[in-house]
Image (cartoon, rainbow, N blue to C red):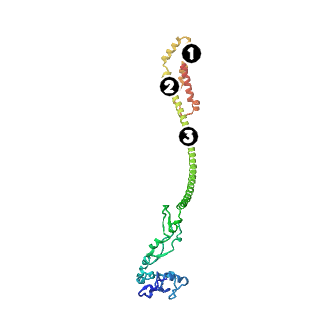
Amino acid sequence: MGYDLERFVGYVNEGLLCCVCRDVLERPLQAPCEHAYCSACISSWLVHHHSCPEDRLPLDVSHLKPLCRYMRNDLSRLQIRCVNADQGCEVICTLETLHTHEDECEFAFIACSNTGGEYICCHCGCPVQVERRGLEAHLSLCEFRSRECPNGCGHTLISNDQSQHNCIAELRAEVELLRAEMLSKLEEVRREMESRLDSQRRHMVQKESQLKNEVEELKGQLSRVVCDVRALLGVERLRRQELAEAELEKRELMELLRALQPTRCQQPVEQLTQSKNQGDQEPNGWQPHRDQQTSIQASCQSLPLAQPPPSPQLGEGSRKTGPRSLTLDCIKRKSREVTVI
């Protein structure tokens, strides 16, 4: 609906009237046929009709657009009386500033702000509507005005309930309410903590299982490494033992070779003759000794003088059965015979 034409002061152009309600346009819209309507009026019309109410041309909501600029300027400059003129307001203002004035008009009726207290339903508050200029006087006398309890309990009371107010009962009810809220919050926190603990417990179990698997794998790797190290130590010990035996055998051979050099085994003819003559002069008890020397010399002449030392890589069985081992055994036997002699 538009503004009542009787509220306006002066002449109002016919083009500024709604084609439906015939009042001055309120929130106007314009059709393609240039007819203007109030927004509420044309919306209600198009629910049952699909044409312009003035010339019956086809019309739809999507065809509507805002009023043209020059018509909006003419509309905003119209002089209108306040809606509270019947209550005594004599203000005349432009249509553009009408809503600003009506929001502050002293003659406008407004509802009392006393709603009956903080814990009381707002529908049980003061039902009186008074003019804005008399609101303060009404609030000072209103039966639903509220104030804090004079005993210091902190509750807000309304005037007609002060005689029935019991501070202890109110505080007890408030404590019970707070206790119920606290228990509800504690239960909610407990459930949340249990959920978190269950999640953490599952995570720890999975982590423990994973760590156990890793530990078992590391143990297996460690056992394999220990076996490999022991095998290497055994091979190294055997190698050192073979090297020590080869070195000992080498020293023995070198000593025997130094003791049985050709210069010592093959004596000059003069010495042999002298030894023969001395042997003829010796008593019969020394004859076996000369025979042993003769056999040693013959053995020395028959032995190879430059034999290489045995290789430490050969096995024990090969040293016992090879020709070189036989030669070494022969040299050792002859050496013991020389020592006995």
- Percent coordinates x, y for residue 327 in the rendering: 55, 27
Question: Rounded to the nearest whole Å, what is the CA distance between mark 3 and mark 1?
Answer: 64 Å
Which circle marks residue 288 in the picture? Answer: 1
Which circle marks residue 226 in the picture? Answer: 3
Label 3: few (<14), some (14–19) or many (≥20) C-alpha neighbours in 10 Å: few
Query: Secondary structure under badge 2?
Result: helix
Question: Can residue 255 be seen in this snapshot?
Answer: yes
Which of 42 and 256 lies nearest the eye of the viewer?
42
Which of 130 and 108 lies nearest the eye of the viewer?
130
Query: Secondary structure under badge 3?
Result: helix
At 56% across and 26% down in the image, what residue appears? 329
Question: Rounded to the nearest whole Å, what is the CA distance between mark 2 and mark 3?
Answer: 43 Å
- Quadrant that contains the C terminus: top right
- Give the mark nearest the N terminus, 2 or 1: 2
- Residue type beneath disc 2: Glu
- Residue type beneath disc 1: Pro
Q: Which residue does the numbered mark 2 point to in the structure image?
A: 255
311, above or below 166, in the image: above
At 50% across and 25% down in the image, what residue appears? 255
